[in-house]
């Protein structure tokens, strides 16, 4: 019984807090977008600021009709959104998000996080393929190429702090940054942060790398045939994944729980929200890039820069170890 | 350098959209706030006027407005009494009106005018098919627009210059 | 059992950008035959918005036609009625007073700015998506356009289909209050349009998406009858306002922007620079507006009094889409025998079948948006 409580309570607590935060991230996005376009965002539900809008949306999506197209593969059609949501939530087991340490205590937390969150693409592929729709097929072809290509700069830009700090676990990374954050490291910190930011935009399917859900050409991409609670699962899973990458970025680059005046675990969430707001500003200001320009940008520009930076940081660490 | 130019373009683009955050919103929340309508507004319903002194109807059923309407929405029946014509029935189908104001412009006695109110929502289609009593009560209910037949035709007179 | 690999050629993938689609600018069906992401060939189907305007006018008198014709090209309505009225006035030798001519040009230029703003806003929607950067550009352009429509409402009474023109002159007059509102509008619009031109012409992703896409050569333009910004983007120096001038355009001084390469970037830049030139025209009109009559015919008593002589006549004006022409055949009565409208969007749209092969799907949307078709004009 004790084992059961020890096992279930952290999972239940994390998932409920996470879903609540993500539902209000949707509210935040609509409000910020409205302010940038000189209009009011959600207003009527919960009168002055529209704070009850996420609950109204969730209720509406739950009451919609639950159907699948005639010639689609029923089992896989219903399975796709479940996979995407479960894997996105499972990757939060490795982040020190609510508690002092992460739920799975290991030294290789960074690598496991990247490995688990790379499985999301399988769910998207299942969803797009089983819809039996040409628009979904084209969108899924594009998204597979995009996500596989952009994993390389993401992993390398996350490896650079680990090489200089010397470990892959989050505890040592947080201890190293108690005086200065990694983003203030002379040249390597800023370039690594920019590489991480750009590849996390591409991993999370945000504008300017948004072609899979390109509403102007392919009517809504791989989610064309979905409605109701399945669409809500896709929508929330995208925000969960993006929030997870923001928390990762705030731990590795922005110092995690260490702040200017005090040290606390709430600062992780605060810095993650800051990164998320910068992603929102980028989303509502730029157009989107075509698929072949996107792939050329990756293989011609991002990967050479990241490999050169990796080499420089390895040499730097070697000479620092020699001297010290 | 090319990289510096790209960086400058990105920053200019971000400044362009983010500078809108401090300016207010331009929405008018319709049922609570309304905007003020100009004088010449012609997007609403019609009204049949009465003479100010005697209280008689102005319309003499000359059928000029029926002939000039491009959409053929007006339907008049004449009735003669007291030495002048009266309109026994005056039907106007508001669903097909294209709001061109040609009927107002051509009326010689200023009988038909447009009212300065947007068209009201109704629940039955037969409410949009106006008859004479509805149009006469419209003229008393709502405010009137600027345009009258005599005003428009007065402004269209070609000014004849006196030869010096 | 031997393992055989059976290869079967299924041909192209046929994708239907059907009549309802978020990015074709109206009702238009385009059938793409794809091979991977490249387009092999294209079939297009028109006619979803055909309303029979040309046949409808055979039963209407000449004074009743302009309000009906304004619904033809619904993004710049006064250019339709202006072209029709110019044709009738040349057939019947009616002279228009100076003040009326100035007011006609004022309303026409205001609607040119509003039409180009719609073209730019919806182009942003095509490039950036309804949830993304394109929506910001769309809402900014429509916010400026609302101010123009408010000024039009003060002058004439409706925001859009203004019915300002009648045969012989103009219907409504401006007084001092309207003139002050137009001056405030110009002072508000001028820095904004310049800022939009600066930001968009230097936008990194915009240049990457539109440069060298959809290059139209001069021979293709001339063989298919393109006109307007489509022709001027390819370097052809032809604008009816200068070459074959009507109304009072020969008393005003303005420039014609011309592009160099003929790609989508040049066409959009030509449209944006045209709006800046239109503001210069409106400023000159506000200075030079003379006093005088509004109409040179007697006030309207009956529509049956206007009977042009027997014969036919053609006249074209410059609408925001290109050369809009009217060919009227009259047989002496008060209703036209036949009226044919030369629609600019129809000839511009016929270039699409030659441009689209050998490009990507994403480029198809960009090219279609830069040609700026309006389907009320294509199908009439």
Image (cartoon, rainbow, N blue to C red):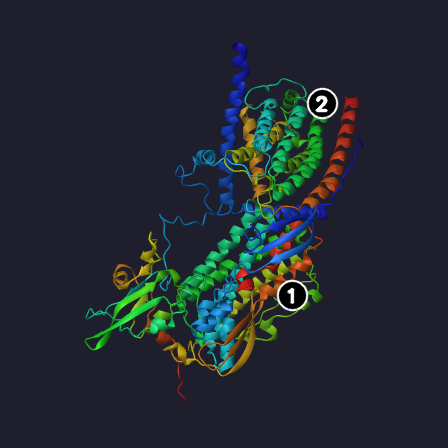
Residue A42 percent across, percent down from the top left = 45, 41
Query: In what element is the residue under mark 1?
Result: helix
Residue bearing mark 2: A166
- The answer to whether A100 appears left or right of A165 in the picture is left
Image quadrant assignment for residue C60: bottom left
Residue C274 locus on image (x, y percent): 58, 63
**Neighbours of disc 1 within 10 Å: few (<14), some (14-19), many (20+):** many
Q: Residue furthest front?
A: C1
> Quick one: C316 or B14, which is closer to the camera?
C316
x and y percent of residue C88 in the render? 49, 77
Badge 2 and badge 1 both on one subunit: no
Point out the frontmost of discs 2 and 1: 1
Residue A186 appears anywhere in the view:
no
Left or right side of A301 for C126: left
Residue name at image x 54 percent, y 14 percent: A6
Q: Chain of mark 1?
A: C
- The quadrant holding residue A162 is top right
The quadrant holding residue B48 is bottom left
Is C378 located above or below residue B10 in the figure?
below
């Amino acid at each position: 019984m004790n084992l059961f409580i020890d096992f279930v309570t952290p999972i239940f607590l994390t998932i409920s807090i996470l879903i609540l935060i993500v539902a209000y991230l949707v509210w935040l996005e609509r409000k910020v977008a409205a302010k940038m376009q000189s209009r009011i965002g959600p207003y009527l539900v919960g009168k002055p600021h529209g704070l009850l809008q996420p609950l109204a949306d969730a209720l509406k999506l739950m009451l919609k009709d639950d159907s699948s197209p005639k010639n689609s593969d029923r089992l896989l059609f219903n399975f796709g959104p479940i996979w995407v949501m479960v894997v996105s939530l499972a990757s939060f087991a490795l982040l020190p998000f609510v508690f002092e340490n992460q739920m799975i205590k290991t030294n290789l937390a960074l690598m496991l996080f990247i490995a688990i969150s790379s499985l999301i693409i399988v769910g998207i592929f299942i969803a797009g393929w089983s819809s039996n729709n040409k628009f979904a097929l084209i969108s899924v072809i594009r998204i597979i190429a995009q996500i596989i290509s952009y994993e390389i700069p993401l992993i390398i830009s996350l490896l650079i702090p680990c090489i200089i700090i010397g470990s892959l676990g989050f505890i040592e990374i947080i201890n190293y940054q108690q005086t200065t954050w990694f983003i203030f490291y002379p040249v390597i910190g800023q370039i690594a942060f920019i590489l991480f930011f750009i590849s996390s935009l591409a991993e999370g399917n945000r504008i300017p790398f948004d072609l899979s859900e390109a509403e102007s050409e392919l009517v809504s991409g791989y989610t064309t045939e979905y409605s109701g609670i399945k669409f809500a699962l896709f929508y929330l899973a995208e925000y969960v994944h993006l929030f997870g990458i923001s928390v990762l970025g705030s731990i590795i680059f922005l110092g995690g729980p260490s702040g200017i005046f005090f040290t606390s675990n709430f600062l992780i969430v605060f810095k993650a929200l800051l990164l998320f707001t910068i992603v929102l500003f980028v989303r509502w200001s730029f157009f989107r890039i075509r698929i072949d320009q996107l792939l050329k940008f990756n293989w011609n520009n991002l990967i050479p820069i990241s490999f050169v930076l990796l080499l420089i940081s390895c040499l730097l660490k070697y000479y620092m170890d020699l001297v010290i | 350098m090319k990289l510096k130019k790209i960086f400058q373009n990105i920053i200019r683009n971000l400044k362009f959209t983010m500078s809108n955050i401090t300016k207010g919103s331009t929405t008018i929340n319709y049922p609570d706030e309304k905007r003020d309508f100009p004088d010449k507004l012609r997007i609403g319903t019609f009204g049949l006027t009465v003479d100010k002194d005697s209280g008689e109807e102005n319309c003499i059923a000359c059928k000029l407005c029926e002939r000039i309407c491009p959409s053929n929405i007006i339907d008049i029946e004449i009735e003669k009494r007291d030495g002048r014509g009266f309109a026994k029935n005056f039907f106007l189908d508001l669903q097909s009106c294209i709001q061109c104001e040609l009927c107002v412009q051509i009326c010689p006695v200023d009988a038909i005018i447009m009212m300065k109110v947007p068209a009201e929502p109704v629940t039955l289609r037969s409410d949009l098919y106006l008859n004479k009593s509805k149009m006469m009560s419209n003229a008393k209910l709502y405010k009137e627009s600027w345009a009258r037949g005599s005003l428009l035709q007065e402004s269209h007179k070609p000014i004849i210059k006196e030869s010096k | 059992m031997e393992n055989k690999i059976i290869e079967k050629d299924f041909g192209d993938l046929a994708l239907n950008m059907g009549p309802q689609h978020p990015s074709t600018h109206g009702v238009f069906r385009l059938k793409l035959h794809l091979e991977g992401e490249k387009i092999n060939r294209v079939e297009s189907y028109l006619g979803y918005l055909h309303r029979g305007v040309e046949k409808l006018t055979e039963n209407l008198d000449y004074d009743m036609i302009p309000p009906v014709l304004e619904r033809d090209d619904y993004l710049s309505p006064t250019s339709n009625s202006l072209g029709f009225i110019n044709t009738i006035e040349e057939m019947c030798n009616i002279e228009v007073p100076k003040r009326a001519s100035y007011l006609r040009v004022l309303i026409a230029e205001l609607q040119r700015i509003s039409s180009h703003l719609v073209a730019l806003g919806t182009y942003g929607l095509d490039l950036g998506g309804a949830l993304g950067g394109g929506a910001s550009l769309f809402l900014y352009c429509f916010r400026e356009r609302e101010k123009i429509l408010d000024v039009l409402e003060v002058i004439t009474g409706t925001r859009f289909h203004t019915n300002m023109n009648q045969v012989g002159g103009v219907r409504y007059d401006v007084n001092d209050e309207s003139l002050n509102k137009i001056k405030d509008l110009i002072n508000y619009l001028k820095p904004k349009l310049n800022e939009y031109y600066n930001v968009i012409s230097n936008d990194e992703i915009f240049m990457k998406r539109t440069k060298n896409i959809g290059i139209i050569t001069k021979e293709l333009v001339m063989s298919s009858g393109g006109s307007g910004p489509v022709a001027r983007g390819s370097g052809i120096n032809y604008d009816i306002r200068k070459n074959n001038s009507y109304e009072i355009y020969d008393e005003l001084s303005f420039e014609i922007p011309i592009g160099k390469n003929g790609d989508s970037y040049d066409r959009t830049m030509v449209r944006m620079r045209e709006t800046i030139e239109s503001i210069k025209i409106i400023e000159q009109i506000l200075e030079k507006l003379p006093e005088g009559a509004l109409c040179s015919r007697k006030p309207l008593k009956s529509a049956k009094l206007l009977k042009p002589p027997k014969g036919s006549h053609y006249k074209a004006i410059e609408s925001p889409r290109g050369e809009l022409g009217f060919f009227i055949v009259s047989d002496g009565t008060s209703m036209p025998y036949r009226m044919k409208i030369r629609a600019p969007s129809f000839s511009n749209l016929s270039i699409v079948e030659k441009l689209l092969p050998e490009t990507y799907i994403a480029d198809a949307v960009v090219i279609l948006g830069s040609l700026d078709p309006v389907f009320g004009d294509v199908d009439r």
